[in-house]
Image (cartoon, coloured by chain):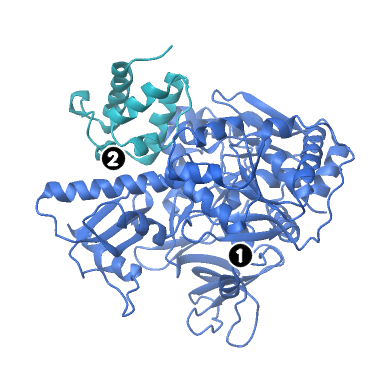
Chain colours: A blue, B cyan
Amino acid sequence: MDILDVLKTNAGLHPDKLAYGYIGKEGEITEQLHYHELHQHVLAASHLLSSKFPVNARVILLLPAEAAFVCSFLGALHAGIIAVPTPISYSEPGINRILSIMRDCAASGIITNAKTYKMLFQRKNDASSALQEYDAEWIFTDDLMAAPAASGAIRRHKESIETAYLQYTSGSTSQPKGVMISHTNLTANLRAINNCFGRTAEDTSVTWLPHYHDMGLVDGLLSPLFTGGTGFVISPLLFITKPALLLQTISTYHAGFCGGPGFGLDHCLARIPQEQLDALDLSSLRVLYVGAEPIRISTLERFAAATQTAGFRKNSLVPSYGLAEATLAVSLHLNGTPTTYRKLTDSKEVVACGPPVEFTEVSIVDPVSNLSLPDGKEGEIWVKNDGIAAGYWEKPDATKATFQAYTSSGEGPYLRTGDLGFMENGLLFITGRTKELIIIRGVNYYPQDIEEVVSESHPDIQPNAAAAFSVETDQGEALMIVSEVRRVAQTPDDEKIIKNKMAQSVGLAFGLIPHEIMLIQPGKLPKTSSGKIQRLKARELFAKKSIVD
Amino acid sequence: MSKTFTEISGWIVERIAHHAEIDPSEVDLDAEIIDYRLDSLLMVDITTELQEWLGIELSPSIFWEMGTINATTQWIVENQEA
């Protein structure tokens, strides 16, 4: 039973049940999809898409959080087309990111809506011209949603281990990597998550997560459908501007399941007055999972304390660990049981992200010697289960390095996560990462991408001599940039201009404001003998300094 | 109903001053908006409010794309009919 079989069954069992409701600015429901209706839309979309694209064609989904997305996504899967959910952005760097994904997977079509299309081409620049000239067929959701009924649309055959959709790991501009998720992967992970959570057809879930990320797509959108329940969807932008809508929706519809990065919880507390929190009823929440970025214990504690009056139970907090390469979840805390904290040093304490999900093997391995490590020892987290993807789209070398790792004693193949942690009493603790990835508000950024933008932001910046890395702040992980400048700026004003240019370029490209920028003399950035930037060393050298200053 | 340059720039100045916790007279139309060091979440808020106030769709990154209040306002004035 994959997600499409489940949809068909549920459409037959309870045709008039609400599958998805979309929440508007005032908390009203703006769109609804009932099970039968959803199934019919999927069949009609599949029929139309089948007439335009061959099996395994890659089609980009450039859509906001609305009913048309899930209909198009499932319609594409039904037609055997490889769906590629892609973030919408209208800025030049944003459009370039869309293009780099399209080129990487040689996309032959784009599904979007009229509004997005208009915004993409509103301003003429090199990126929008390149997008216009790209040889792809544009499909509009107005046509897809109005496609003639095709109750008998035939599901085009594909093996369940073939790629159903590509999950691009976010942020990667220079080298986008599309994780190939099959129905086998998706079904295994959806089953693992929902068996662990205990989510049933009686349950209601709420999501505000972007559907082009693994968490937003797999759990946010597909889990409610997979379990035959109801999912309410709030767009990420709406959540950012009005976080109270999320908790209000949970309260109104007695939702049992919700989740996201810890920043979402912090954001709720920062924006919602205590009296408003107290007036909510969050007692229905059985799972509020927290993941996608390092989990801060203070976030969990503060949220639990602030929502206690609203009836939220602290043991509904579910620290979780996962990654797109594993479809989504690797380990989940068991809801209803207290969380476990472990003190590592006087200043560092970590929370257990539960035991590995069902049928999953987690090994802690020395990342240099590939030697398996015993309980309690910190090493790289290696994972084996049916949720692990086959690899990255047309990247055999990267696939081999990441998805086909063997321990020194020959066990494998494992997925190398690049994250560091340890197992203790069957629980997985995350402590850091070997990869130089930057994770801010649940979004992954590749330092190379940021450094490239930094290098081009001002003529005085030394080429190939910037390091982007994350630093810990009171608000969680934040971006720090250290860059060499050709002439050391003469006056504080010159320095300010350069820093502003940098911040502006990074803001435009990534929607991210650097927490701290440091300009240094040429030759001061640590590099290897072959000229590779040593980011972790740069962090060691400069991040500490900035605290003293 | 189209809004004038002064109305739009005045609105943006007021919102930026409010969030940056400074007096509107300290907000310079030609300064880089990034100078005010507003959190990216606040910039999303301001853009969303601006869209609602104008009744038109804007790119979420419009302030970064345009750089200054003057440039942003100019762009809106030229495009608000579209």
Above or below, A108 relative to A390: above
Residue named by callout 1? A392
Q: Nearer the viewer, residue A137 or B52?
A: A137
Above or below, A292 relative to A68: below
Dot 1: chain letter: A
Residue B34's tag is: 2
Category of crowding for the residue at label 2, using alpha-carbon neighbours closer than 10 angstroms: few (below 14), some (14–19), many (at least 20):
many
Q: Nearer the viewer, residue B27 or A60?
A: A60
At x 22%, y 31%, the residue is B30
Say left or right for A316 vs A75. left
Dot 2: chain letter: B
Tell me the quarter of the image containing the N terminus of chain A.
bottom right
At x 70%, y 29%, the residue is A32
Q: Residue A222's spot in the image, x, y percent?
A: 69, 46
Q: How many marks?
A: 2
Above or below, B79 relative to A436: above
Say if mark 2 contacts mark 1, CB within 8 Å.
Answer: no
